[in-house]
Image (cartoon, rainbow, N blue to C red):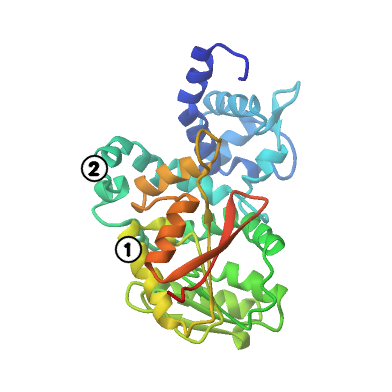
């Protein structure tokens, strides 16, 4: 769109939800899975998806115009590299994320004005409880969220491991470690390392099964609890990936101060988040910031904001290590002040 009139550029941006919902429907219908064996026409796909052939053709044609699927001269559709990402059972699949973003998250984004007016979570306004409590009470949505995070964060984990050297850490505690996918990847790369996975009791049971399946049970202690109350001691470094951005400053300080209480003094604090760039620099973190406002009620932060938050919790920010993705490793140590 570069070089187009401003009206055309803005109109294109305003149509963003068209793409979100078209992708969502394609994911709901599992069209990419149905095309795994080769090209098919809408007439062939309609019975398998419970749709009408002509409307389904129109959906596929639109998606093919943006390189999600490809249409041939016989009006058959096949997979493209983008469509491959919508297959549900492939490494790095974005199928779960397409369902999540086009469903629960889409509904909440429709209430962005409420969040801007009040500073409160739009998701909580819609559903009557915070998003993570919602996932605890709605198991299937919780599983979908886990799968979506695993799919979208897989690249981030690899980039983090490429950028940051964990080799001097004997025991790493993953605070809010979810299903254990991040800690599993780190332990697999560093076979001498021990791990502690900490999250809510219901969450760690899912993680325990994943660690057992990866053969890491003997190297990783699984602990249930609430990081707003305390975190387990005994680690050389405390890792939190996409945890602090879920919360406002007050709640984030509670988490960080509980980490500080668990530390003896020489441990590292590793906060893995996006860092909002200054001025008008393009940064996906600026839109993730809106997502955090709308969904859990948190925020993305600038380097200065992370520095101030760290200092208020008793840490000194030592360096920020960027990765090939939008996230960075924000390293801190216990402040001597």
Q: Which residue is situated farthest in the front direction here? A: 337
The front one of 78 and 3 is: 3
Residue drawn at (44%, 50%) of the image: 300
13 to the left or right of 125 = right
In this rendering, the answer to whether 34 lies above or below 213 is: above
Residue 113, placed above or below residue 250: above
Report x, y in % for residue 169. 63, 79
Task: Specify the label residue 251 is tagged with.
Answer: 1
Q: Secondary structure at mark 2?
A: helix
The residue under the point 30% across, 57% down is 130
The relative height of residue 254 versus residue 324 in the rendered view (above or below) is below
Q: Is residue 186 left or right of residue 46?
A: right
Q: In x, y percent, where is residue 251?
A: 32, 63
Whole-number angstrom distance, CA of label 2 to CA of label 1? 18 Å
Percent coordinates x, y for residue 111 in the rendering: 30, 38
* Residue 50 seen in the current view: no
Helix, strand or loop at label 1? It is helix
Residue in the image at 67% along x and 78% along y: 168
Residue contact at pointers 2 and 1, CB within 8 angstroms: no
- Residue carrying label 2: 118
Q: Residue at x 40, y 69 (%)?
A: 256
Q: Is residue 148 visible?
A: yes
């Amino acid at each position: 769109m570069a070089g187009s009139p401003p009206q055309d550029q803005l109109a294109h941006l305003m149509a963003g939800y068209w793409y979100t919902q078209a992708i969502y429907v394609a994911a709901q219908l599992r069209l990419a899975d149905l095309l795994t064996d080769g090209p098919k026409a809408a007439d062939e796909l309609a019975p398998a998806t419970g749709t009408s052939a002509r409307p389904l053709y129109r959906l596929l044609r639109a998606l093919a115009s943006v390189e999600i699927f490809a249409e041939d001269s016989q009006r058959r559709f096949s997979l493209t590299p983008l469509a491959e990402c919508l297959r549900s059972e492939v490494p790095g699949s974005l199928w779960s994320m397409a369902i999540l973003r086009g469903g629960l998250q889409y509904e909440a984004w429709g209430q962005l004005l409420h969040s801007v007016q009040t500073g409160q979570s739009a998701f909580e306004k819609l559903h009557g409880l915070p998003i993570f409590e919602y996932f605890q009470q709605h198991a299937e949505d919780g599983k979908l969220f886990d799968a979506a995070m695993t799919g979208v964060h897989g690249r981030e984990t690899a980039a983090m491991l490429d950028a940051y050297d964990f080799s001097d850490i004997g025991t790493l505690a993953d605070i809010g470690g979810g299903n254990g996918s991040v800690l599993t990847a780190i332990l697999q790369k560093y076979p001498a390392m021990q791990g502690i996975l900490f999250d809510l009791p219901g969450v760690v049971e899912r993680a325990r099964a994943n660690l057992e399946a990866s053969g890491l049970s003997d190297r990783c202690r699984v602990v249930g609890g609430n990081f707003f109350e305390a975190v387990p001691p005994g680690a050389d470094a405390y890792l939190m990936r996409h945890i602090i951005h879920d919360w406002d400053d007050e709640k984030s300080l509670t988490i960080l101060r509980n980490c500080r209480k668990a530390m003896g003094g020489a441990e590292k604090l590793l906060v893995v988040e996006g860092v909002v760039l200054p001025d008008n620099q393009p940064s996906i973190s600026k839109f993730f910031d809106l997502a955090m406002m709308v969904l859990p009620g948190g925020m993305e932060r600038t380097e200065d904001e992370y520095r101030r938050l760290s200092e208020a919790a008793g840490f000194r920010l030592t360096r920020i290590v960027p990765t090939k993705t939008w996230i960075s490793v924000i390293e801190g140590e216990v402040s001597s002040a």
